[in-house]
Image (cartoon, helix red, strand yellow):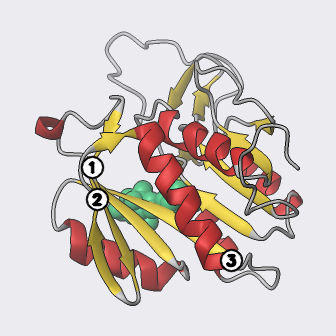
Amino acid sequence: ALLDGGKKPLAGRTAIVTSGPTHEPIDPVRYIANRSSGRQGHAIAAALARLGAKVTLVSGPVTLPDPSGVTVVEVERADDMLQAVLAALPADIAVMVAAVADWRVATPNAEKIKKQPGEGPPPLMLTENPDILKTVGHHAKRPKVVVGFAAETQDVESNGRVKLQKKGADLIVANDVSPETGIMGGTRNSVKLITAAGIEEWPELSKEEVAGRLADWIAEKLT
Ligand code: CTP
Ligand code: CA
């Protein structure tokens, strides 16, 4: 019998979770990033581990402690996050929670860019980052359960449905990150679950509660 008395429906399963922002260098001292505390992604990694999964958490720069019982791979750039995720395949479960920067500076400066009096700000040439969720969702070693998030400020449901389709995910967890919701950077979350079967709305919950319910949803999907 298990000493902690808990049930471990994900025992023997492997999971990859991405969390936090990515930092895309402009030069050695500056970067482009999305807002992300990493709280939701880290809580999901912890919740999957509690259900018995062997979890690799690929995390961008965050100030959170490593969740217990989870292997953490720290990365900075989207390119590095993608490589770390691919290196962790095959896996049964992928939950891509990271707020990946959509663009990076095409050629980061090796030296700190200095202000040039009279010349104005330097132009930044951007290039698109790889889509990690989409890559995993269409991969030859695609995990059995692929979950993505969708941070939206408008048209949450229709944008979420498009992402479900385009990215090859089984589930998109969509949340409204309009400034007035106060979700961004906070400890609570209000999400809609979008699957091919339809939409389910969860009440406002703590990010830990969202993580726990999501881990249960994943466990059920695998049985
Ligand atoms: N995602 C990813 N790699 C990227 C961009 C996004 O893995 N380069 C993942 C996120 O982790 C999330 C999902 O895709 O699970 C949706 O991210 P989001 O930023 O909402 O969607 P985008 O496809 O980037 O579209 P947009 O930002 O234009 O709304
Ligand atoms: Ca994006």
Query: Which one is closest to the eye, mark 2 or mark 1?
Result: 2
From the viewer's perspective, is residue 139 above or below residue 182? Answer: below
Q: Residue at x 61, y 25 (%)?
A: 27
Q: Residue at x 36, y 29 (%)?
A: 187
Between 10 and 67, the one nearer to me in the picture: 10
Q: Name the amino acid type tagged 2.
A: Trp
Q: Position of residue 40 (x, y in %)?
A: 48, 41
From the viewer's perspective, is residue 29 above or below residue 61? Answer: above
**Does ligand 1 reach within 8 Å of label 2's beta carbon?**
no
Element type at marker 3?
Answer: helix
Which residue is denoted by mark 3 in the rendering? 222
In this view of the protein, can residue 69 be seen by the observer? Answer: yes
Is tag 2's residue or tag 1's residue first in the polypeptide sequence? 1
In terms of image quadrants, where is residue 86?
Answer: bottom right
Is tag 3's residue or tag 2's residue first in the polypeptide sequence? 2
Which residue is denoted by mark 1 in the rendering? 190
Which residue is denoted by mark 2 in the rendering? 202
> Label 3: few (<14), some or many (≥20) within 10 Å?
some
Q: Name the amino acid type tagged 1.
A: Ser
| 194 to the left or right of 149 | left
| 127 to the left or right of 11 | left
Tag 2 and tag 1, C-beta contact below 8 Å: yes
Is tag 1's residue or tag 3's residue first in the polypeptide sequence? 1
**Does ligand 1 reach within 8 Å of label 1's beta carbon?**
no
Q: Position of residue 223 (x, y in %)?
A: 69, 79
Between 94 and 99, the one nearer to me in the picture: 94
Q: Position of residue 96 (x, y in %)?
A: 58, 57
Q: Name the amino acid type tagged 3.
A: Leu
| 107 to the left or right of 186 | right
In this view of the protein, can residue 82 be seen by the observer? Answer: no
Q: Residue at x 23, y 72 (%)?
A: 157
